[in-house]
Image (cartoon, rainbow, N blue to C red):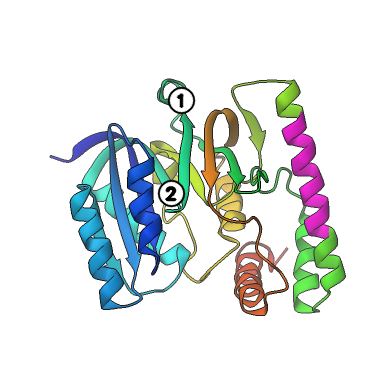
Amino acid sequence: MNKSYNFVYVVLTYRNTLDLENFFKENKLENSKVIIVNSFYDEESKEVFNQIALSNKADFINVENLGYSYGNNVGIDFALKNYNFEYLIVCNSDVLIQKMDTDFLLNASRENIYGPKILTLTDKDQNPYIHTFSLTTRKLFYKAIVNDKMTLRRLIYIANGIVRRLLNFYTKVIKKSSYNTYSCHGAFIIFGKKAVEKINPVFYNEMFLFQEEQFLARKAYENSIAIKYIPHKVKIKHYEDGSMDINNKQMRDYSDQSYIKFFNYFFSKK
């Protein structure tokens, strides 16, 4: 019989073993199971990750490094096959759970996806990732990528950032348990059991790195699954310096390739 937990975490790792050590040291994971999926870098880091898993009674899966989407999909499949749970959480290893209102979650709908308040080291809000969907904006961003229009790309980033700030100001004034939004940041995503079952496979394996939030949001929308922003119920500190640096060509190339695949998957014929 499959074991039951309130929360099952899927934590994808690559190379950096210290983040995972700190993940277990800093976070209280009550009534939870952690599944570590290692995107293989070398034998040395693989063995360290495996020992961390054993020390913390976590599952360990080693996979070929085929990217964020593939690794998380493997972990999600493993969770669905081996455990009964109320929520599945896909998260980075470099996060600190500052607040986790389990009473709220255990009384909330398992048919939804939830995005917490996520703050970077510089206190930048990372949620909501994109608050409102606009096909026109998605098409403009696609054109900015394929035509290498950096100015247009920056304008879209700035516009989304302004909307995010306005919404977070609103949530400070009008405090509700949840707010409808279009997409949430991939550093910490909470899936109700019914939601993850309905849209599995959750991510698109052809997208190696970045833009996974775009794919998840659209897939959720097309399957009538709500994404709820819950800044007053779950709060996360994300130990990174903020958004991807679009001036870093390698990272930008990964992001662009993923966005093109996302766009073609959903919108190429629209």
Residue at horizontal 21 percent and vertical 60 percent from the top = 51
Residue 247 image-quadrant placement:
bottom right
Amino acid type of disc 1? Asp
Q: Marks 2 and 1, how far apart in space?
A: 17 Å
Residue at horizontal 64 percent and vertical 47 percent from the top = 126
Callout 2: helix, strand or loop?
A: strand
Estimate the x, y position of residue 142 in percent, counting from the top left.
Answer: 75, 69
Is 166 included in the stretch rendered in magenta?
Answer: yes
Up/down of 18 relative to 123, above or below = below
Estimate the x, y position of residue 31 in percent, counting from the top left.
Answer: 27, 32
Residue count near mark 1 (Cα–Cα under 10 Å), binned few <14, some 14–19, many ≥20 = few
Magenta-drawn segment: 156-169
Query: Which SS does the magenta portion mostly show?
Result: helix
Q: Nearer the viewer, mark 2 or mark 1?
A: 1
Question: If the image is split into quadrants, where does the N terminus sit?
Answer: top left
Q: Using the image as rendered, state which of residue 194 and residue 158 is in the foreground.
A: 158
* Left or right of residue 215, residue 15 in this image: left
Is 71 included in the stretch rendered in magenta?
Answer: no
* Left or right of residue 229, residue 43 in this image: left
Q: Quickly name the residue at label 1.
A: 101
Residue 90: give its label: 2
* Total numbered labels placed on residues in the image: 2
Estimate the x, y position of residue 128 in percent, counting from the top left.
Answer: 66, 43
Can residue 136 be seen?
Answer: no
Question: If the image is split into quadrants, where does the C terminus sit?
Answer: bottom right
Up/down of 22 relative to 45, above or below = above
